[in-house]
Amino acid sequence: TQLLEQSPQFLSIQEGENLTVYCNSSSVFSSLQWYRQEPGEGPVLLVTVVTGGEVKKLKRLTFQFGDARKDSSLHITAAQPGDTGLYLCAGAAGDRDDKIIFGKGTRLHILP
Amino acid sequence: EAQVTQNPRYLITVTGKKLTVTCSQNMNHEYMSWYRQDPGLGLRQIYYSMNVEVTDKGDVPEGYKVSRKEKRNFPLILESPSPNQTSLYFCASSWGPYSNQPQHFGDGTRLSIL
């Protein structure tokens, strides 16, 4: 069974600090996606990483896909209260890659 | 505006009373899914559909039914709801599950089964 494990589960840090959250698997994924979810809303896609070793930047957010395509990380520089939310990674799974699985998420709280 | 619309947003009902949660998308997407989100368990896929008349089980299909008679609609049916189906439900659509296809989510349906 393919699984995506995210760590840490919870993270509370001061505004201005840097942080990294992780999404790991023992399985290879053709691509991984990162979503952010705010209370009362559905997840919203932040980025998709496709190539092993790929690094993508979205303002203060940097996403990396592991060389072996089994893991990914999200690094936030100078965190702001607006970054608060639930961060989820997701990938296609199943024999035909037609299912979607999500990690359980990292709940991030940035203190002003 | 491109969107996925779920109804109702909130529902409180009783065990055994059949209910349907509707989902509609206006992006002409082929792939649609239902998820449930529970504390500590994350988002889990219930059913998905690759296209009209094509549906398949996700990770937690027990107690649910779906249908895909039209491309834009993908209702979730609970024939005999039970308290363990109390959860937050999301419908999502995309061009496909593979590669770099973003999932577009509805705003969710909070379902309570008493």
Image (cartoon, coloured by chain):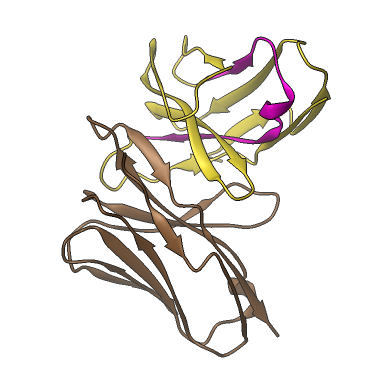
- The segment highlighted magenta reads B74-94
Give whichever of B71, A97 is nearer the camera.
Answer: A97
Judge left or right: residue B93 versus residue A13.
left
Viewer-side residue, A6 vs B67: A6
Do we see residue A59 in this rendering? no
Task: Please tell me whether residue B76 belongs to the stretch shown in magenta.
Answer: yes
The image position of residue B33, as x and y in percent, is 47, 30
Name the image quarter holding the C terminus of chain B: top right
Name the colour assigned to chain B in the rendering: yellow
In the image, taking residue A32 as reference, residue B104 lies left or right, namely right
User: Which chain is brown in the rendering?
Assistant: A
Seen at 38% across and 38% down, the residue is A100
- Give the quarter of the figure containing the N terminus of chain B: top right
Please, which residue is most extreme toward the bottom here?
A16
All told, the count of numbered labels is 0
Q: Is residue A24 magenta?
A: no
Query: Which percent across, then down, holds residue A10?
Result: 58, 68
- Residue B74 versus residue A43 in the image, above or below: above
Residue A86 percent across, percent down from the top left: 57, 60
Which percent across, then down, holds residue B45? 47, 33
Does residue A75 appear in this view?
Answer: yes
Quadrant of the rendered image containing residue A32: bottom left
Q: Nearer the viewer, residue A79 or B86?
A: B86
At a point 70% along the width and 17% down the height, the residue shown is: B81
In this rendering, the answer to whether B62 lies above or below A72 is above
Name the residue located 48 percent from the left edge and 86 percent from the top edge. Answer: A18
Residue pictured at 60% horizontal, 41% vertical = B37
